[in-house]
Image: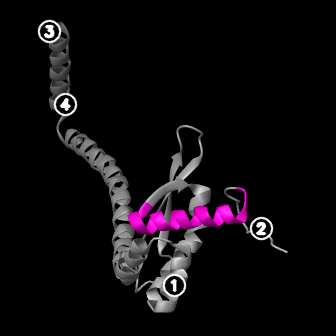
Amino acid sequence: MPKPTKGPRFGGSPAHQRIILANLATQLFQHGKITTTEAKAKRVQPLADRLISKAKRGDLHNRRLVLQTVKDPAVVRILFNDIAPAVAEREGGYTRITKIGPRKGDNAPMAVIEVITESVEDSRKAKAKGAGKPVAKKAEPKAAAKKAPAKKAAVEEAPAEVVEETPAEVVEETAAEVVAEEAKDEQA
């Protein structure tokens, strides 16, 4: 007895669903990335990963298996000649889904699914660089904010110490001068 596949059903019948997923996978390999709904992106991702794994093997049998799903021979050539060598070092996770927010017309959640062609080493370096930079950037403004009040406090304390060391008569004269200057500023 045929049972429905797991996840959302597209198109009503299992045959129509297979066609929709095959077309999505074909467009993904042809263009490198596509914009679709989140549900369709989540459903096409395992299919695309399986097809890329078959393309990595590269033999005639796997090429014919891929041709059963992807009907366009030009796209199969792209998959076997361009995409498979680019992801040869990866052991899985050949595609990435990025959510981009709701669609304007019907508020359907949209996503971009793309083939990851960068090498594993490049992505590890980017993660290492990316992980180190934001932490340092976030820590520096906080540290600078903490240091700045400390400097101001030190500056404020320094004149107070200087005032204490000077004789009381000089302090009274400077205070009187400050009051006189403020009065002039208010009049002007």
Q: In the rendered structure, are the residues bearing label 3 and label 2 in contact, judged by CB atoms less than 8 Å apart?
A: no
- Quadrant location, the N terminus: bottom right
Residue 137, position as x, y percentages in the image: 33, 59
- The answer for how far apart the CA atoms under marks 2 and 4 are is 91 Å
Q: Is residue 32 magenta?
A: yes
First in residue order: circle 2 vs circle 4: 2
Amino acid type at image mark 1: Arg
How packed mark 1 is, by other alpha carbons closer than 10 Å (few <14, some 14-19, many 20 or more), is few
**Residue under label 4:** 171
Q: Residue at x 18, y 20 (%)?
A: 176
Q: Residue 59 or 133: which is nearer the viewer? A: 59
Residue that mark 2 sits on: 4
Amino acid type indicated by mark 4 = Val
Q: Earlier in the sequence, mark 3 or mark 1?
A: 1
Q: Of 111 and 20, which appears nearest the observer?
A: 20
Q: Earlier in the sequence, mark 3 or mark 2?
A: 2
Q: CA distance from mark 3 to mark 1?
A: 91 Å
Question: Relative to 55, is 148 above or below?
Answer: above
Magenta part, dominant SS: helix
Q: Is residue 84 left or right of residue 154?
A: right
